Image: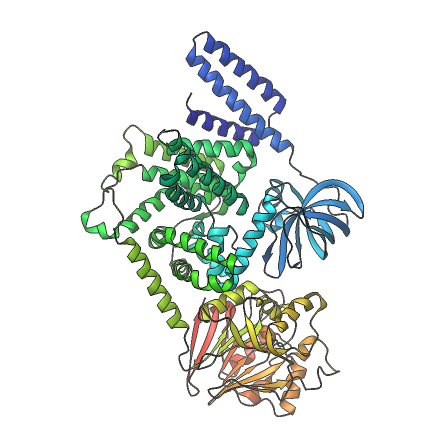
């Protein structure tokens, strides 16, 4: 019996145990009987019978392991759906930020001051600065049973991780630090590297690089992630065995000659263990670590390595250690893509001589094709998505991934020293990440970039793999014969110079496109249901009016608009403290400092007061927005506050929208009125005071609410252009009557939910409109 056969049989046994859920004790007896029979047969010289009985024992072991794991799943929780509880718990995951919220897994130790048998919950709450793995916190909230409403199979997904409840914490209090452990130390290092990288490199490249090397893409804007998914490049973002192999190869290459294979193996083992823990034990990393150690170990004992045996041993051992991995899409995709790549690398391809300069791209296309063919049914079964034209986008960026990985490692390592050093060291990684994300952005908009399909059934997946196995290993090796026109290629000797040239080209063009062009730019950002406006003056001063609801989205736009070295905003103005205007601004710290912070006249909600104070602390000058204020932005650009009055919010206001700041931006003949969420009562006051003067452009108030944008205001302003910042919502914005009033007056109406980010560019006399997603 070969090791490869044993691993595959064990893997099949685990799968049967998970799917059929047989009785573990019966399997244990049967497995023991098969093993004893194998021993008796071997001693009797019946080697063939002994081999089959031993395989049966291995299958029974795997099935018993799978069945026992299913029986131990936490499918219910006695405290779920029982109302508000006060809980003492220990953090058992690395806390991460998701927009304005902090998420982590918690082991509950006490409920309402009474000790309980520990159970795990997925917690979402307001951020606790400095919270780490192992810390003790006190929560107040309602434990709930996970439902399918969050996503298909969400309850099963959590159960596979031992989580039986979800908690949206109303209050979180730090009780005490946890004890020192390997996970706490490594997660602490990861947090330091992540924070330094996010502070040194603009978004979305910072989160992309941290996803590649640290296993967490915290802060990556949703739009960038969707681009990667549609273009077939999302696998690059996920930390994988490829990362481990690159790092292990570097370690072995440095230590093998001077210190020998034994020391190199020890160093590689320590690296793989530490990196697996550091990245949270993701299945692709663990699988890659096992395969790397098997390959290096084979060299130590003087045996040739065998990729298929290493892969089978890695996935089999992982399945026996944690059977529920077989149900994880990340595990399934990792195994399938690794198998496809192994098959592709084992072929003797032939390439026409005329294509030799394109060797890296041709290799990437062949390897990517094999990986996508192998993983296609898994993507179709779990996500209802087929790869489409992702082959081409992969061919463009995969040859650069080793360089990008090493650059990301260098950036993360320098971030441990300090953001200032990382800002310099991470520049190559930033340029390569910008190139990858740029390719993803363009490819995602090509028709057929990815194809949606109904989720495949297990029977369809089985038939697909059966046919594929027949094609690649049948008597005539049909698929190999079809592709035998290709031959092996070797990377050009000047590949490093090619990589350096690519980095420099991307960096130069990226910076050139961010430099001021002598015109005024007003970008109404596509932040969903919210408001955010980025103003860039002719000489490059930056003004942010509101920030939308999502800090990740705002930081992503700022990272694209500002030069890579710029971490300063000249003016930040918050019209009023609703989360769909304020939320994004709460994420500016610590990445950006502010020159002038114009705070709202209405009080900031207590729940977010601390975060707003952090923004104020990073500002040179802080003042409350009030009518009569004029901010000279240079180049003839002025920002004038028209409302609220200097005395603060009027006593007649009905909601905080009636205290929303209204400002006018002027440059030459161009005038723009930004109304925040001000409604009719404010509009009437502006008209009565003569403050509503003719304007080229109107930012329609309150996302097009029926309670604003009156005929009187439109008559006073006479705009030719109106912009509505709006996203999917349950309020009916924009209102049909508002759209009709704009239409009847011949005002061109542009909406961010239809066009994406809308940018108005003017030289003070003429203007042009650009829209992009």
Task: Give the colour scheme shown.
Answer: rainbow
Residue at (56, 48) in percent of width and height = 186
Percent x, y for residue 291?
43, 36
| 445, above or below 274, in the image | below
Depth order, front residue of 416/519: 416
Residue 633 lies left or right of residue 117; in this view the side is left
Residue 467 lies left or right of residue 492; in this view the side is right
Q: Residue furthest left?
A: 353
Q: Quadrant of the C terminus?
A: bottom left
Could you tell me if residue 53 is visible in this image? Answer: yes
Percent x, y for residue 725?
54, 72
Residue 729 lies left or right of residue 650; in this view the side is left
Residue at (26, 46) in percent of width and height = 490
Percent x, y for residue 660?
65, 78
Depth order, front residue of 411/554: 411
Number of marks in the image? 0
Depth order, front residue of 650/755: 650
Residue at (49, 47) in percent of width and height = 383
Image quadrant assignment for residue 477: top left
Image quadrant assignment for residue 305: top left
Could you tell me if residue 221 is visible in this image? Answer: no
Image quadrant assignment for residue 29: top right
Depth order, front residue of 181/372: 181
| 761, above or below 309, in the image | below
Q: Quadrant of the N terminus?
A: top left
Residue at (50, 9) in percent of width and height = 40
Percent x, y for residue 480?
28, 36
């Amino acid at each position: 019996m070969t090791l490869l056969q044993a691993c595959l049989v064990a893997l099949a046994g685990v799968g049967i145990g998970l799917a059929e859920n047989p009785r573990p004790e019966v399997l244990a007896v049967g497995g023991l009987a098969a093993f004893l029979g194998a021993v008796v047969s071997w001693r009797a010289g019946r080697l063939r019978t002994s081999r089959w009985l031993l395989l049966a024992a291995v299958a029974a072991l795997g099935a018993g392991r799978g069945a026992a794991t299913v029986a131990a799943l936490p499918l219910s929780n006695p405290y779920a759906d029982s109302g508000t509880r006060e809980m003492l718990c220990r953090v058992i995951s690395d806390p991460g930020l998701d927009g304005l919220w902090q998420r982590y897994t918690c082991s509950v130790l006490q409920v309402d001051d009474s000790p309980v048998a520990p159970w795990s919950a997925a917690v979402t709450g307001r951020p606790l600065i400095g919270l780490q793995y192992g810390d003790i916190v006190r929560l107040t909230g309602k434990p709930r049973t996970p439902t399918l409403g969050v996503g298909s199979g969400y309850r099963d997904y959590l159960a596979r991780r031992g989580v039986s409840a979800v908690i949206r914490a109303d209050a979180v209090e730090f009780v005490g630090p946890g004890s020192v452990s390997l996970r706490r130390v490594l997660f602490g290092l990861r947090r330091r590297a992540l924070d330094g990288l996010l502070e040194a490199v603009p978004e979305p490249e910072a989160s992309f690089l941290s996803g590649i090397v640290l296993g967490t893409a915290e802060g990556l804007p949703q739009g960038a992630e969707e681009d990667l998914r549609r273009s077939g490049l999302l696998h690059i973002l996920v930390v994988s065995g490829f990362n481990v192999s690159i790092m292990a190869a570097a370690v072995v290459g440095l230590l093998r000659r001077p210190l020998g294979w034994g020391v190199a193996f020890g160093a590689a083992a320590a690296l793989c263990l530490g990196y697996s823990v550091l990245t949270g034990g993701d299945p692709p990393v663990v699988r890659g670590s096992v395969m790397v150690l098997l390959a290096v170990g084979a060299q130590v004992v003087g045996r040739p390595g065998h990729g298929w045996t290493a892969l089978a041993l890695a996935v089999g051992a992982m399945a026996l250690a944690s059977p529920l991995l077989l149900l994880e899409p990340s595990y399934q995709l990792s195994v399938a893509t690794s198998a496809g790549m192994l098959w592709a690398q084992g072929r003797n391809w032939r390439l026409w001589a005329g294509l030799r300069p394109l060797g890296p791209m041709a290799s990437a296309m062949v390897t990517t094709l094999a990986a996508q063919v192998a993983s296609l049914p898994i993507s179709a079964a779990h996500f209802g998505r087929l790869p489409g034209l992702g082959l081409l986008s992969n061919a463009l960026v995969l040859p650069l991934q080793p360089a990008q990985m090493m650059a990301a490692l260098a950036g993360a390592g320098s971030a441990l020293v300090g953001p200032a050093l990382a800002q310099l060291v991470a520049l190559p990684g930033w340029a390569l990440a910008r190139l990858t994300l740029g390719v993803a952005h363009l490819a995602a908009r090509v028709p057929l970039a990815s194809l949606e399909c109904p989720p495949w059934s297990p029977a369809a997946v089985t038939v697909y793999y059966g046919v594929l196995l027949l094609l690649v290993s049948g008597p005539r090796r049909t698929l190999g014969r079809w592709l035998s026109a290709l031959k092996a290629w070797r990377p050009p000797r000047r590949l490093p110079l090619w990589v350096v040239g690519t980095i420099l080209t991307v960096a130069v063009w990226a910076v050139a496109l961010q430099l001021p062009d002598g015109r005024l730019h007003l970008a109404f950002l596509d932040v969903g249901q919210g408001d955010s406006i980025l103003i860039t003056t002719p000489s490059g001063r930056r003004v942010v009016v509101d920030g939308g609801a999502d800090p990740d989205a705002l930081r992503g736009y700022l990272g694209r608009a500002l030069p890579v070295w710029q971490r300063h905003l000249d003016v930040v103005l918050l019209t009023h403290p609703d989360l769909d205007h304020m939320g994004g601004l709460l994420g500016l710290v610590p990445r950006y400092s502010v020159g002038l912070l114009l705070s709202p006249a209405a009080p900031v909600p207590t729940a977010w007061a601390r975060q707003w104070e952090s923004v104020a602390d990073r500002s040179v000058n802080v003042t409350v927005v009030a009518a009569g204020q004029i901010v000279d932005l240079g180049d003839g650009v002025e920002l004038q506050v028209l409302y609220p009055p200097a005395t603060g919010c009027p006593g007649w206001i009905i909601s905080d929208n009636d205290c929303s700041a209204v400002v006018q931006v002027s440059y030459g003949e161009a005038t723009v009125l930004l109304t925040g969420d001000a409604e009719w009562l404010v509009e009437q006051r502006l008209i009565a005071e003569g403050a509503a003067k003719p304007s080229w452009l109107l930012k329609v108030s309150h996302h097009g609410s029926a309670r604003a944008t009156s005929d009187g205001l439109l008559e006073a302003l006479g705009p030719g252009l109106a912009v509505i910042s709006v996203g999917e919502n349950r309020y009916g914005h924009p209102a049909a009557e508002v759209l009709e009033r704009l239409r009847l007056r011949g005002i061109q109406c542009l909406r961010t939910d239809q066009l994406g980010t809308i940018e108005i560019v003017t030289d003070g006399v003429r203007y042009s409109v650009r829209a992009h997603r």
